[in-house]
């Protein structure tokens, strides 16, 4: 029987959080290697991945999601546009805004770079039952939400320190 509140985490829960942290570290390292192999800065590549996940967004939204200053995001978008990873599009609802549209999947070098990981993950996924995959997928969604909340919490603390 599970409990929402326990005084002390169990050894299994501690091992679980340790493995999640390790997975996060390996994910960051993998992304750094992918960025390098594509000739990109890590922040540029992270922005491409954010755009891939979120879809077209404004530069202001990208600034919030990355934690980069708006001037840095403008330079980042310039680099990505120059290299064919994004394009700017006027916002049909607000002529003052520009929407950043990812062209991620159109880049053969990106899909080629990710293909071995995709193949290995599909193979890993095939070792689980449908029910297990549904549970794992549900967990990953919830874990992503927890991480987004923690990112927001940390960025709130950082911005309140800088305004003090």
Image (tube, rainbow, N blue to C red):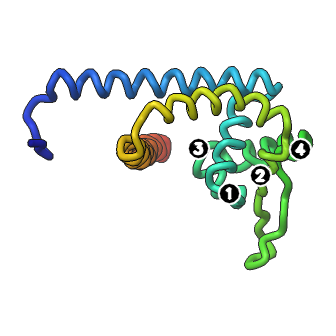
The secondary element bearing badge 4 is classed as: loop
Q: Are marks 2 and 3 in contact (CB under 8 Å)?
A: no
Residue 32 is situated, as x and y percent measured from the top left of the image, at 66, 23
Q: Are marks 1 and 4 in contact (CB under 8 Å)?
A: no
The alpha-carbon separation of the residues under discs 3 and 1 comes to 18 Å
The secondary element bearing badge 3 is classed as: loop
Q: Where's the N terminus, which quadrant?
A: top left
Residue 48 is situated, as x and y percent measured from the top left of the image, at 72, 43
Residue linked to disc 2:
102
Front residue of 72 and 136: 136
Mark nearer the viewer, 2 or 3: 2
Residue plotted at (43% across, 45% down):
137
From this view, report whether residue 51 is shown above or below residue 44: below
Q: Are marks 4 and 3 in contact (CB under 8 Å)?
A: no
Front residue of 147 and 71: 147
Residue plotted at (62% across, 55% down):
54
Residue linked to disc 4:
84
Front residue of 20 and 164: 20
The alpha-carbon separation of the residues under discs 4 and 2 comes to 9 Å
Report the disc number at residue 55. Answer: 1
Indicate which disc, 4 or 3, sits on the residue closer to the N terminus: 3
Residue plotted at (57% across, 26% down):
28
Mark nearer the viewer, 4 or 3: 4
Q: Are marks 3 and 1 in contact (CB under 8 Å)?
A: no
Residue 62 is situated, as x and y percent measured from the top left of the image, at 66, 52
Q: Quadrant of residue 127?
A: top left
From this view, report whether residue 24 is shown above or below residue 92: above
Q: Is residue 164 visible?
A: no
């Amino acid at each position: 029987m599970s409990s929402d509140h326990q005084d002390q985490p169990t050894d299994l829960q501690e091992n679980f959080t340790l493995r999640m942290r390790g997975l996060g570290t390996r994910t960051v390292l993998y992304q750094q290697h992918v960025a390098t192999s594509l000739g990109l800065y890590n922040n540029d590549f992270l922005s491409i991945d954010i755009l891939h996940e979120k879809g077209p967004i404004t530069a202001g939204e990208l600034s919030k999601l990355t934690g980069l200053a708006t001037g840095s995001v403008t330079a980042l978008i310039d680099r990505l546009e120059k290299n064919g990873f994004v394009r700017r599009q006027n916002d049909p609802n607000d002529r003052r805004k520009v929407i950043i549209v990812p062209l991620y999947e159109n880049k053969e070098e990106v899909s080629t770079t990710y293909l071995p990981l995709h193949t290995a993950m599909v193979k890993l996924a095939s070792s689980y039952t449908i029910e297990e995959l549904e549970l794992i997928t549900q967990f990953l969604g919830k874990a992503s939400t927890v991480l987004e909340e923690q990112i927001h919490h940390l960025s709130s603390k950082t911005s309140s320190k800088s305004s003090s």
